[in-house]
Amino acid sequence: MADGDAFDFADAFRDFLPTTERSLLEARVAALVKLSNEARKSVEKIVGLTRIAYGIPLVDGDKSGEWLQATIREKEAGFSLSRDREDARIVSAIVLDSILQAGGYDRVATLLLAATFAGQRRAPGTGKLELAARDIFSDSARTRGLEFSTRISKSQWRDTSKVMARVATTFDATTVKIALEAVVAEAKAAEERAIEKFNATLNKLTTENVRLAEEVDLLWWHLGGWSYILKRPLGSIEASSLPFVIGSDIAEMVNTLPGPHGVQGIIRKALGASADEKQTIEATLKAVEPDDRAKLLVGARDKDVIASLNYGLALLHDETTADSFARTFQKRTALSLDAELTRFEIASQAYFERLFIKREWL
């Protein structure tokens, strides 16, 4: 979808504000198109839009808010990010939706699933953005292997008939030299195109083999009951912290998004009969033994608060006082430590967070 042509920004904006005046609508659509096109070229901008859409306070040094405000102000001088906060959230949600609908953005879909924190945080709207993200994530994982193909098309030579015709007509040294140079250049170009196609196919084959290996690894992990990160039996881990460990463990074994199709099933199986039991965020984090925190936080320190479980664990690891811990966590993540989630939801959240920490998106 080049330049956002296939996405109806005006219609998407009217879904939120159906009585918007025409002049404001035109200004917002111009801003939405520009924001969407620029965001697709920048991980930082996509992550920033996600923070804004889900009401997560921007971190120090994040310029995404300034970028969004400046872009809207090009057509609407009175717009203010601090004053028009809900409008900014709506704009961010629409831009993220346009990116999702463009296709080929598995990472964005997975990022939004991490941001929503099992529904504890919501983007503006009726849940359409979260549903789209979940559908894209699950469909992509399901069809990833089915769409695989190793067919390499024949490399086509460009037409050199004109220079060869001149050789047949004159056959002088200069013409022959030009013709030979043209043929050699095209032979080299054709070879480069063929190598490029071969390497692209080889990369696809490698990725597919990685996917299959990951699925086998997950099965052995489940059968063995051994924590990949903590390097000890899952049965020895305190029950309330187990969902966090399981989600993190599985993500640590996945190297390409959206990961194997069976990940969610493996998570549920690993949790067993307790998968649908509920527990608070606070209980989950405080159950992680002090000696295990550092191992679980490798690569996760000072990361984005979208990865809220890891952010909360880092706060605890820094020996924050109980009052300060609760206050800082809620202020930075827009979540309450008392929020209850099922153990399956906590494990899935830990999985999504670790995927992005590994890929350095968060």
Image (spheres, rainbow, N blue to C red):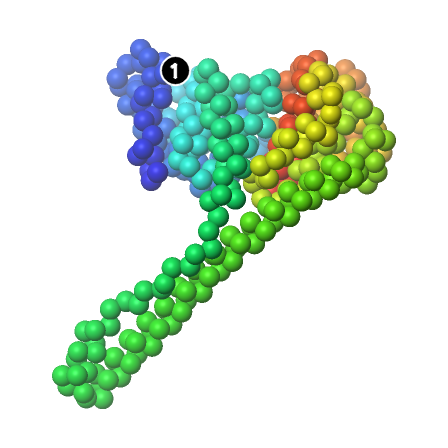
Q: Is residue 29 above or below residue 147?
A: above
Pointer 1: residues within 10 angstroms few (<14), some, or many (20+)?
A: some
Left/right placement of residue 301 relative to residue 165 reads right
Q: Residue at x 56, y 40 (%)?
A: 257
Amino acid carrying label 1: it is: Phe
Q: Residue at x 25, y 80 (%)?
A: 178
What is the quadrant of residue 247 in the picture?
Answer: top right
Q: Residue at x 28, y 67 (%)?
A: 158
**Count of all numbered marks drawn on residues in the image:** 1
Q: Quadrant of the C terminus?
A: top right
Q: Residue at x 83, y 36 (%)?
A: 233
Left/right placement of residue 62 relative to residue 83 reads right
Q: Position of residue 255 (x, y in %)?
A: 62, 45
Q: Position of residue 26 (x, y in %)?
A: 28, 23
Viewer-nearest residue: 274 or 3: 274
Viewer-nearest residue: 234 or 52: 234
Left/right placement of residue 64 relative to residue 233 reads left
What is the quadrant of residue 282 in the picture?
Answer: top right
Q: Is residue 123 above or below residue 153?
A: above
Q: Position of residue 244 (x, y in %)?
A: 72, 28
Q: Is residue 348 above or below residue 340?
A: below
- Residue 348 in view, yes or no: yes
Q: Position of residue 57 (x, y in %)?
A: 57, 23
Residue indicated by mark 1: 16
Viewer-nearest residue: 179 or 157: 157
Left/right placement of residue 162 relative to residue 66 reads left
